[in-house]
Each structure stands twice: as C-alpha cells, then as structure tokens.
Amino acid sequence: MGDVDPRASRIIGSNSVGGLTFSIWDILITLDDEVNHIWIKRRSSWLKWLFLWTRYFGLTAQIANLFISPATTSFPLTPRFCKAALATQHLIADITMLISVDVILIIRLYALWDRKLWIAILLATCTSILVVVGLTGWTLSLQSEYAYGCDVVNEPYLVFYPLTILLALSFEGLILVLTLVRCLRFRRSRQGGSPIIFTMARDGIVAFFVVALSGVVNLIIYVVLDRSLSPVGYSWFLAMTSSAGCRLILSMQRLAPRSPSDMDLTGDPQFTTVLFDNTVRPGEESFAMTSISQTQTQPPSQTQP
C-alpha cells in the first residue's frame, strides 16, 4: 500500500487544523452563555447533557482525527488502520453528530406543534431510516477494500455514503418546512411577533443552511474530487454541525422565562417545558412550569385593606 500524496496530506492537515481552530474559537465566544445557561442545570437535565455531548464530543472527535486521519498520521497505512480510521470517522460524522443536531431540531419542532402524535411518528420514522442507512454504511466500511491512501474501492460503501448525506439533507429540509409552516400559522393566529417563534424560525433556517452547506460540500468533495482529498471537509463538517446544534440550544435558553411575567406569548407551559428544560441547581432562580400554569390560571388574590 502506497503512501499518501504529500500535497493531499498538506491540504487535509491544514483543513483539519482549521476546523479545530474554529471549534475552539466558537467555544470561547459562547462560553459565557454556556456557563450561565447550561452549567447551572442539574445533572439530571437531558438538555445539559445533549449540549455537552454535541459540543465536546465533536471537539474530541476533531482532535482524534488529527491522529487517525490517513493524511496526517504517522502510523503505517495498513488495512487494519484504514478500517479503524474510516469506521470511526463514518460513525462519528455521519451518524452521531447528525443525529445530535437532528434531536435538537426534533425537540423544538415537536414542542412547536403542540406534541401532536403524527409529528412524533413522522419524525421518528425519518430518524429511524437515517440511522439504519448510516449504520449500514458503517457496517460496509468495516468490510471495505482499500487502495492508495486508504481510499475505499468497494462499490456498496461508495453508494451508501452519499445516500446517507442526501437522506440527512432531505430530513433537515422537512424539519425546516414544518418549522416555517407552524411559525407562519402561529403568527397569523396571534397577530403578533412572539420572540420565541421568531427565534425558532430564524435558528431553523440558519441551522438548515449550515448543515446543508456542510453536507453538500462534503458530498461534492467525495464524488467529484480525487479520492485522496475525500477527507478534506471532515473536520469542518464536525465543526459546523457542532456549532449549529449548540447555538440552537443557547439561543432558546437566552429566552427562557425566569418568572411568570417573563412567559412568552405562547402561553403554553408544556411548550416552554420542552424547549427550555428549566432544571437548575438548588438555590438558583427557577420556576417550574406547573407553578407557572397555576399562577396564570388562578385568580389574583384580593389585597386586604
């Protein structure tokens, strides 16, 4: 098995460092919001762990990529190494990080549609299809045959990898359409501009284009460019999807109600509970959604003269 093309190695290595640098920069500029909105949550908060997983697992994957990438590693490019490197990258990029961002978008959309059953069934079905296709591609990567520079030469994997990206882009597009439809309906019915609804529409559009652009660029690189350059966009894909997922959570947490008077125009405690997951450490200011609901429904107490 030959060595990696030196030119391709330099290009891939510089892009790997660039993606990692972007992730570190993104963490630093949003660290205040992370401390104020994420770290204060209880250990039992699902939103806290989803955020930390999306942010720091992606960062860890990029650091590990510098050591396992065929273009930047000093290890010999044996079939065993190629199999481990490709399988790890495929599992992290195409399944784990994509699903993490999709889970965040699904939670927002499920709450926005008032927890309707058909929405849950539709999203669960699409997610299951994406996971099955991704795992199939991952399984095929374990059985791959390799050529120069750890390039995959067996046809099944070359089909399933682009298919995984296309399915992910289609799923992201469906989530965006459902988000915009619901936001427009809500705006017309309430005749006003709710900050939560505006934020969900804005962030949904931004997240779609960030993930879609990353996926399309990686797909073009994989299909059009020389095989030796196929990993060039991997680090940027991890960086962009991790940033998009974390910013989706942070942007909603900035609007999280801290008191009954801060409730959004939705007036739906369940909606706010799903979005914000307001579980903070004891002693921190927090209002349970059930208490907010009771406060809104109970008549005001009469002040004694």
Image (cartoon, grey):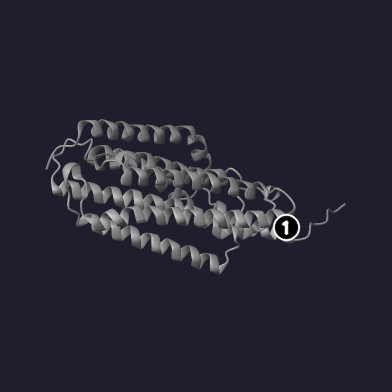
Quadrant of the image occupied by residue 24? top left
Tell me the SS state at disc 1: helix
* Number of numbered discs overlaid on the protein picture: 1
Image location of residue 148, percent across then percent down: 17, 43
Q: Is residue 193 left or right of residue 238?
A: right
The quadrant holding residue 214 is top left
Judge by depth and name the residue closer to the eye, 135 or 286. 135
Q: Residue at x 69, y 60 (%)?
A: 294
Q: Confirm whether residue 46 shows in the render.
A: no
Q: Quadrant of the N terminus?
A: top left
Image height check: is 40 above or below 122? above
- Expressed as whole percent of the image width and height from the top left, the position of residue 168 reads 42, 54
Query: Which of 46 and 10 lies nearest the eye of the viewer?
Result: 10
- Quick check: can you spot residue 301? yes
Residue flagged by tag 1: what amino acid is it?
Answer: Ser
53 up-or-down from 107: above or below: above
Q: Residue at x 42, y 52 (%)?
A: 100
Is residue 80 depicted above or below 115 in this figure? above
- The residue nearer to you, when weighing 279 against 22, is 22
Q: Position of residue 154 (x, y in %)?
A: 21, 55
- The residue indicated by pointer 1 is 189
Q: Residue at x 48, y 32 (%)?
A: 29
Using the image, determine if residue 73 lies above or below residue 167: above
**Percent position (x, y) of residue 273?**
58, 56
Outermost right residue:
305
- Crowding at dot 1, Cα within 10 Å, few <14 / some 14-19 / many 20+, comes out as few
- The residue shown at (36%, 40%) is 59
Closer to us: 37 or 207: 207
